[in-house]
Image: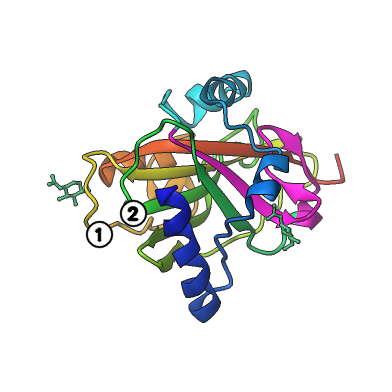
Amino acid sequence: MLIHMLIRCFVFSVLAEFVISFIVPDQEVLTSLPTNKDPNAILAALRNADIIPDVLNTFSPLLSLTLNWSSTAHTNLGNTLPPSSLQQPPSVIINKIPSAYLPYNTQLVLALTDPDAPSRDDPKWSQVCHWLVTAKSGRVKELVEYKAPAPPEGTGSHRYVVVVMVAKNGTTEGLELTVPKERRHWGYEGERSGVREWAKDNGLKVVGANFIYAQNDKQ
Ligand SMILES: *[C@@H]1O[C@H](CO)[C@@H](O)[C@H](O)[C@H]1NC(C)=O
Ligand SMILES: *[C@@H]1O[C@H](CO)[C@@H](O)[C@H](O)[C@H]1NC(C)=O
């Protein structure tokens, strides 16, 4: 309930300042959304795809999260989408998981990351930061601007993982967040370093995740 209000605020600020939109659909639309709201099913899908442990440690889902590029392209825990459908920044649909506790006014941080760059077998550039956005009390700020997924030719299927984080200590104060120095490795050293290291350095914990697969037409 509270999170709905919070996100409704985002819509207004977004219209004023940003292309990114956080949308709360009507209740009927919500129930027809493919987003899985069962925390165990979310974790199972992430484990099946090895996103836990490649990208994330195990966590307690408090929010369900969908990126929506168009009426035919949204994240659904491991569906495959053509890169051509991912060109523009998506809207973000976030719902509180029933029974989860998250105070109104909590700052949300959203990241889109590719652990499979240039390929899943050879992740030497990974993770690549594709998007980093934060939202609090009607203010949305893009820390790293949206870079559309563009998996290179012949590199197979990439996992594109979207994550929502909040402050680990439960504060509802505004957060001072660092901006990653580079997209590659999120500015860290080592294969597959990225959102996990950045979240740790910024005192954040993961409370929601979703993902798609995408690959170049030429394989
Ligand atoms: C997804 O985005 C499309 C295009 O902007 C929009 O028409 C559709 O209503 C959105 N779906 C949801 C569930 O918000
Ligand atoms: C809570 O964590 C945030 C983010 O790391 C930090 O900025 C803030 O100072 C912390 N607040 C308290 C009360 O520990």
Residue topped by disc 1: 174
Q: Which numbered disc, 2 or 1, marks the residue that appears first in the sequence?
A: 2
The residue drawn where x is 63% and y is 48% is 27
- What is the crowding at mark 2: few (fewer than 14 residues within 10 Å), some, or many (at least 20)? many
Marks 2,1: beta carbons within 8 A = yes
Q: Which of 190 and 145 is in front in this view?
A: 145
Q: Which mark is residue 27?
A: none
Vertical comparison of 113 with 135: above or below: above
The residue drawn where x is 43% and y is 23% is 58
Vertical comparison of 160 with 54: above or below: below
Is residue 64 in the magenta section?
Answer: yes
The residue drawn where x is 58% and y is 35% is 123
Q: What residue type is labelled 1?
A: Gly
Q: Where is residue 71 in the image (x, y as percent from the top left)?
A: 78, 55
Q: Which amino acid does label 2 sit on?
A: Gln
Ligand 1: image quarter: bottom right
Q: Position of residue 36 (x, y in %)?
A: 63, 32
Q: Which of 161 and 184 is in front in this view?
A: 161
The answer to whether residue 115 shows anywhere in this view is no
Image quarter where the C terminus lies is top right
Q: Where is residue 5 in the image (x, y as percent from the top left)?
A: 44, 57
Figure disc tally: 2
Q: Where is residue 9 in the image (x, y as percent from the top left)?
A: 45, 66
Which stretch did the figure color magenta? 62-85
Q: Which mark is residue 107?
A: 2
The answer to whether 100 appears left or right of 160 in the picture is: left
